[in-house]
Amino acid sequence: MAGESRPPQTRVLAGLVLFGVVAVILGVTQLRTAINRAVADVPTTPSATAADDEETARRTALAAADTDGDGLADLDELERTITSPYLADSDSDGRTDKEEIDAGENPNCPIGKTCVAPLNDTAAPLVAEEVAPPAPVGDATPADAFDLRRAMDQLPRDPASIRQTFREAGIPAAQLEQLTDTQILELWERAMETIEQQ
């Protein structure tokens, strides 16, 4: 009797082993499918080349645009003259920014006012130019003479202080009051980036 009961047990055991192998194979297949789906759903980040292309396209559009119609490209107003690309007369003195630049005047300083020099030399022609670093004095290097980073870190960071700094630089209070705090902070950041790039 012992011999007759063994074959059914062996068959059951073989069936269970076969079932286990099939279950493992199906489980691995299902896991592989789930992983492939998850990997396919991960959004890809744009490449640096795509970001560079977008920035180039943005700058090209700004170089071609003259939103305020004053004769200066928006890119020049944002980066070179630091004037408003939305106001033909950034200092509200009755002369367009281009007229003042052509006359060698500061388009950010109203006629009759004494203003601090602009962030960029607006009297210079609107062309790219190479600027030689200052010559060292004795054993000192330009970095020893003036640490721009340290000076910039001490500049104001709140909208009220920035507005005051802009007023002291000759920008009309009425024009500053038209800007939101967010716009003031963005303008300040662009000015700081321009200074860092020089």
Image: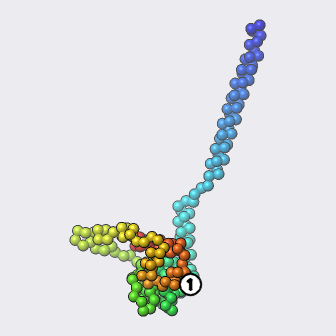
Nearer to the camera, 82 or 179: 179
Residue found farthest to the left:
138
**Image quadrant where one finds the N terminus:** top right
Q: Residue at x 44, y 91 (%)?
A: 111
Q: Which residue is mark 1?
A: 68
Please state the horizontal and vertical placement of residue 98, each as a whole percent of the image. 49, 87
* Residue type of the residue flagged with mark 1: Asp
Please indicate whether residue 53 sits to the left or right of residue 13 in the image: left
Please state the horizontal and vertical placement of residue 162, each as a whole percent of the image. 45, 75
Q: Residue at x 66, y 36 (%)?
A: 28
Q: Residue at x 26, y 72 (%)?
A: 136
Please indicate whether residue 198 sits to the left or right of residue 30 in the image: left
Nearer to the camera, 164 or 46: 164
Q: Is residue 123 above or below residue 142?
A: below
Residue 114, image quadrant: bottom left
Residue 31, image quadrant: top right
Q: For numbered disc 1, what is the local secondary structure?
A: loop
Q: Is residue 174 above or below residue 43?
A: below
Q: Residue at x 42, y 92 (%)?
A: 112
Q: Residues within 10 Å of mark 1 (few under 14, many from 20)?
A: some
Please state the horizontal and vertical placement of residue 101, each as a whole percent of the image. 45, 87
Please state the horizontal and vertical placement of residue 157, each as a whole percent of the image. 45, 70
Q: Is residue 21 visible?
A: yes
Q: Is residue 66 visible?
A: no
Nearer to the camera, 89 or 71: 89
Please indicate whether residue 60 sits to the left or right of residue 109 in the image: right
Tally the numbered discs. Answer: 1
**Image quadrant where one finds the C terminus:** bottom left
